[in-house]
Amino acid sequence: MASLFPSSSEGPSAEDGFVEDPQRAPKIDPRYEAERLAGYDILRVRAENPGPFTLSGTNTWIVGDHPAYVVDPGPALGEHLQRLIEAVDARGGLGGIALTHDHTDHAEAVALLRAQRPAPLAAARGGANVMLRDGTRFGPLRAVPTPGHARDHFALATERACFTGDAVLGEGSVFVDAYPGALAGYMNGLARLATLEVDVLCPGHGPPIWEPECKVEEYIAHRYDREHRVLLALGSGKRSVSQLLDAAWSDVPPELRPAALVMLAAHLDKLDEEGLLPRGVERPEL
């Protein structure tokens, strides 16, 4: 699951998976994109589950052939599953399935796919055959921890590409949960992604990213911009949830305030972990 909000002070782009104006979303020629990805032996199969949390739909990625590996089988939609099976069969069969994380929109189709095309599953938790840890190898994939959006989140890198799940999106940025260490872990994960020498990021939602270094730098800058806003608000004496939210997420429409509350909690937790949170600050009740 991706998530929401408009972007920071840099204008009306999008944050956390929500695009306010679909006309501003990048226009991609699907045939050109497919040809370009084919040069990396990658195929994108997008599920028809568009929405504010999934953008144009969840991306399932197929990499390699004889056998092929599937990253994030996606939602349990009959047409999507059939397209996956046909694509896998055309590539010489299924060697394995890997999950970036186990949110429903990424993982719901796992059991259905394995029922028709049995293959080992690699994931960070649950009933996986291969448990992902930092550096775990699974077929052509190498696991890179990217927690924050979910505790079990991993990016999966090949020599020239990285499947980022909901750590980095093709449009906007991502929702970070508010469990202990979530935002610090997310920032560390972005720093790890910045060190990868790959040509393309293949996100869980939105189009491929052909300037990986620029995108990751943009994500890091964006998070620090939000943190700076929170620190300025705290420095001016603001302590209540409503005051901090108004100061640091003033650009968020009312319907997205609940998601912004979670992000505020994640930022406050990070500041507290770093010893930078003043006394008397109200934390959102989640």
Image (cartoon, rainbow, N blue to C red):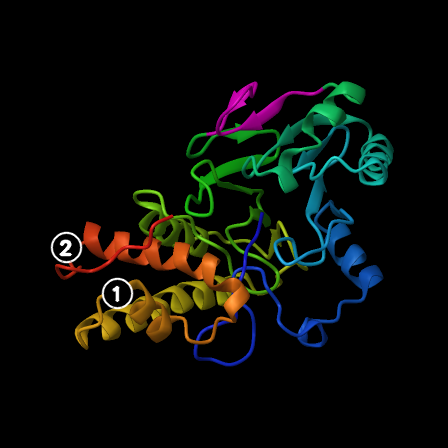
Disc sitting over residue 240 in the figure = 1
* Left or right for 175, reference 171: left
Q: Amino acid at mark 1?
A: Ser
What residue is shown with label 2?
Answer: 275
Image position, residue 233 (x, y; %): 25, 73
Above or below 44: residue 137? above
Front position in the image: 255 or 206: 255
Front position in the image: 84 or 259: 259
* Left or right for 30, reference 247: right
Contact flag, marks 1 and 2 (Cβ < 8 Å): no
Q: Residues within 10 Å of mark 2 (few under 14, many from 20)?
A: few
Front position in the image: 159 or 143: 143
Quarter assignment of residue 66: top right
Q: Residue at x 51, y 81 (%)?
A: 11
Image position, residue 132 (x, y; %): 48, 29
* Left or right for 257, reference 112: left
Q: Amino acid at mark 2?
A: Gly
Spatial CA distance of label 1 from label 2 is: 19 Å
Q: Secondary structure at mark 2?
A: loop
Q: Residue at x 86, y 35 (%)?
A: 82
Q: Is residue 131 magenta?
A: yes
Disc sitting over residue 9 in the figure = none
Give the prevailing secondary structure in the magenta stretch: loop
Image position, residue 125 (x, y; %): 49, 26
Quarter assignment of residue 75: top right
Image position, residue 229 (x, y; %): 31, 73
Q: Identify the mark nearer the N-term, 1 or 2.
A: 1
Residue range highlighted in magenta: 119-132
Q: Residue at x 40, y 54 (%)?
A: 262
